[in-house]
Image: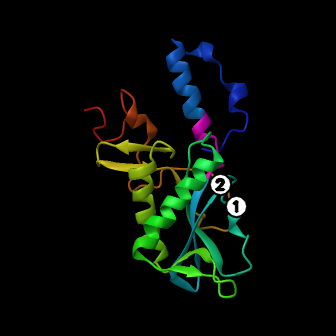
Amino acid sequence: MAINKYWEDDFDENDYDDLKEAHVERERLRQENSNVGWIYIGLDTRNDREAKIGRTIGTPGSRAGGTQNRYYALLCAFKIRDGVHPSTIELIEGAVHEMIERDYERMRHPRTGRKTEWFSINSFFAKQIVHDFLYEKFNQYMHCYHCHERDKGVIYSWEPPIDSGRVRYQATDLSNPPVAYECSMPPGCGADCDCWG
């Protein structure tokens, strides 16, 4: 489903039985239609043993080509809830850096010697441990849910499309297998996942 920039114009709280139900639906639509605020992981396509871990209050695209390294690419991005203050996003990024730096070397800029956002860690492994850390420590700020069927936290995420078509920065459930948000509400999603069985 594509992001609807005009969801607020289409939303009518009178379509719901009570104000609480309308509020829950409004918040769900707000989060689903937000494409700003992410913790992202980038890589150098020549060396998957290094990962760049950063944040953006914009879309992941704002970090897709910001480097002079033509081999740099975004691997994934984890969606932060719409409405989280930029200073909180900065704190989350700092906590992720600190967690990674405990076990992996943080690279320094060759000329200045300053710490960079690059770490000596396999980028695909970084994706998994950053996801788990964000869900465990910062789930209140992440666009996420807990899948009771799999006893797993899932953060809505973005990965680049396989085809070279137009890139849309929309957070989706990239867990395997994905679980529909309907699993969280009676009567369930209708799939054979026993979400309300």
82 vs 18, left or right, is right
Q: Which secondary structure dominates the residues rendered in magenta? A: loop
Colouring scheme applied when the structure was drawn = rainbow
Give residue 15's position: percent from left, percent from top. 59, 15
Where in the figure is residue 64, as x and y percent of width and height? 68, 67
Q: Is 147 inside the magenta-drawn segment?
A: no
In the image, residue 5 sits, relative to residue 128, either above or below, namely above
Query: Mark 1 sits on what residue?
Result: 61
Q: Label 1: state its secondary structure.
A: helix
Q: Is 35 included in the stretch rendered in magenta?
A: yes
Image depth: mark 2 or mark 1 in front: 1
**Residue labelled with disc 2:** 169
- Direction front: furthest residue: 113
Which mark is drawn over residue 94? none
> What residue is at 43 percent from the left and 65 percent from the top?
99
In the image, which residues are magenta? 30-37
